[in-house]
Amino acid sequence: MGILDLANPTRFLRLVQIVLPWLAGLCVIVFAAGLYMSFFTAPEDYQQGATVRIMFIHVPAAWLSMMCYSIMAISSLGTLVWKHPLADVSAKAAAPIGATFTFIALVTGSLWGKPMWGTYWVWDARLTSVLVLFIMYLGLMALWRTMEDPIKAGKAAAILTLVGAVNLPVIKFSVNWWNTLHQPASVVRMDGPTIHPTILIPLLVMAAAFTLLFFVLHLMAMRNEILRRRLRAMRLKAAAQARPASAALSPQAAE
Amino acid sequence: MSGWISSLFRRELQLATRAGGSALVGVLFFLAVVTVIPFGVGPDLNLLGRIGPAILWIGALLATLLGLDRLFQADRDDGSLDLLLMAGRPLELVVLIKCLAHWVATGLPLVAAAPVLAIFLNLEPVAIGAVTLTLLAGTPALTFIGAIGASLTVTLRRGGLLLAVLVVPLAIPVLIFGVSAADAAVSDPVPFLTPFLILCALTLIAGVIGPIASAAALRFSAD
Amino acid sequence: MPKLIVDDLTVDRGGRRVFAGLSFQLEAGHALVITGANGAGKSSLLRTLAGLVPPANGRMAFEGGDSDSTLAEHAHYFGHESAVKRALSVSSNLEFWRDFTRPVLPDGFAANAMAPMDILELLGIGHTADLPAAYLSAGQTRRLTLARLFVSPRPLWLMDEPTSALDAASEAQLIGLMNTHLKNGGMIVTATHTELTALSPVTALQLTAPAAGDHGGHGYDDDLEAFA
């Protein structure tokens, strides 16, 4: 089944119906394994104690916040270049999920920061970049919400997503520059020079679990968005059917 | 070839400066923002002198963004936008020229007002010169980036606030290097020229990306 | 001979199918009058021909025209909105559109660009040339909008309700000008509620609302054929 076959929303929905239970089940299993490993098999850090376990949530969330934006950027190309009818559905469905993971990354980052830095928020280059990404997600969601026609909103959001994708490296670079200018690199980084396998393996399993969770949520959100648009199409159809009667009442009104 | 360019530029300039245009409101807003800051942080002249370049840059950023919501909307409201699309001129170039005219009408007055406002903020002469120079090099980038937001929100009744939300994250690099360059001229952790040249590069990049993205958004908006 | 060709044109707007499978040809020197009820797609057809609305399906082309120009660049769009800037003077409004709009003169189209002052005099608003356009009445604004079509000639006029806001005398003059345009080898596609029988030679095109089952959009209904 090629990607073009999936252009049909009905066929796509049928595929989602088959794939989703398996994907969700796999996600639960991997999560169970990952959580068990992070809580029971991974050792405590000799300096940070149990707080190091926040990393098993924080790092996958941060990874997903980036991956989600990449998926939105690819979907935007799909909207603008290949004109794939499901591309803007994919982009729109991904935005709130990406914003949520970004938010989780921010919250866990500051919770980790409290015992480490003694304060919940530091204008650290990474946290600041993630905050900017969060604002961009919210801006995109606001743009979608304010435009009524989903096709037009999809095109506008696609342009903004791509401009954002081009800008993200520039923003990242500028924030790093700004950060080294104002506070020379003395902040403890989360990733040490080497990560011991007893920590690395749970981390990778958790990253896989989060990625699976993303795909489950993304497929569900796409399904909902397709149903929402179908509802809109049916309402438009219902409105169009009532037209002859109203035309009879006001025969010569300007268009 | 060049006849229509100068014609468009002159028209945009006239529209911005005549009745109904908003060229000078931006400067008044700039003045208002800068006046309000000392009430917030206190009249400590040393502190104001230290954060002065940042205040001027943030004021210029806000004044630029708030003046941009009518950049294309006025043309859409009276049907001119349809004709701009049909005229057979490259739309990216049309957007670029509209942005330049808008900057001359609204951005240049901000640059001109900056030295006066810098005196209120107790900036040293070197810092005044540096801030003015960075604003001159950096505010066009704000207009180009803002044009993307203006064309994305052109169909919305009250798009001004949304425009600012969409555009502010994209404008962060300009702000960082603008303020860094102005600071570098006084207290030198880095030479002035490094951030200043990066700022100029950002303006040039924005001058390419802004019109391209904005023209694409305008084409979609005509539907 | 230039010719406007529309073949199997389908237009969707806002997820709604406006019309489908529309085909017609228009030869140089001919006018096409589109009639139809509200929402039958008269304005949508004109805006599609003007390149402002992308068609969902089908082909439209200006054959025998200038090869460097698109269909939209062969056309003047005369819609409901005036595109007049109230703060600028009448003459500078018109001069801008003369400079900005690229004239397109294919073979077989024999119109000449008129000087802004001449067309303003001809339309009876020459005395307002130096006044800001804000002082014009609705009818005068409409005539200023019309003047744009003469300062930068293009063969195809797309006119949406051209006679609105015009009195009987101005309407007669407009129809005379439209007939002159046809004689010069131009074409007119116009949407109207009133009969424009005074145009010649003229073809009529009746648009009807699509049947209830014929629903387009992007395949979000259960129509499996839509993307099959």
Image (cartoon, grey):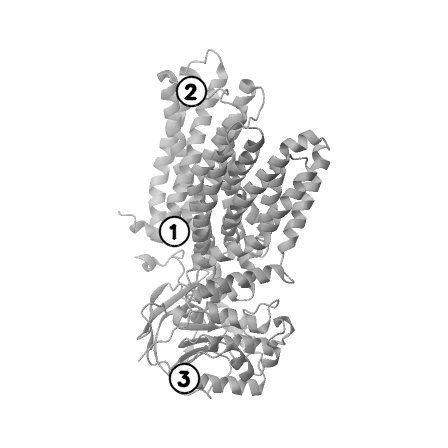
Name the chain letter of the residue that bears numbered label 2.
Answer: A
Horizontal side of residue B105 vs B194, given as left or right: right
Nearest the viewer among C92 and C49 is C92
Give the residue displayed 43% in from the left and 75% down from the top. C208
Q: Residue A230 appears at what percent x and percent y?
A: 44, 54
Q: Tag 2, which secondary structure?
A: helix
Residue type indicated by callout 3? Leu
Q: Are marks 1 and 2 in contact (CB under 8 Å)?
A: no
Residue A106 is at least partly visible in this image: yes
The three-letter code of the residue at mark 1 reads Thr
Residue C127 at x, y percent in the picture: 61, 80
Residue A100: numbered disc: none
Helix, strand or loop under label 1: helix
CA gap, disc 1 and disc 3: 42 Å
The mark lying in front, picked from 1 and 3, is 3
Q: Which mark lies nearer to you, 1 or 2?
A: 1
Circle 1 crowding by C-alpha within 10 Å: few under 14, some 14–19, many from 20: many
Name the residue tied to disc 2: A38
Mark 2–mark 3 Cα distance, whole angstroms, equals: 81 Å
Element assignment for label 3: helix
Where, quadrant-wise, is the N terminus of chain B in this rendering?
bottom left
**Residue A169 higher or lower than C29, as above or below:** above
Residue C184 position (above or below residue B201): below
The residue that label 3 is drawn on is: C182
Q: Quadrant location of residue B121?
A: top right
Q: Amino acid at mark 2?
A: Ser
In this view, the mark in front (2 or 3): 3
Q: Which residue is mark 1?
A: A79
Please tell me which of labels 1 and 2 falls first in the chain: 2
Could you tell me residue B34's position as x and y percent? 67, 41
The numbered mark 3 sits on a residue in which chain?
Answer: C
Q: CA distance from mark 1 to mark 2?
A: 40 Å
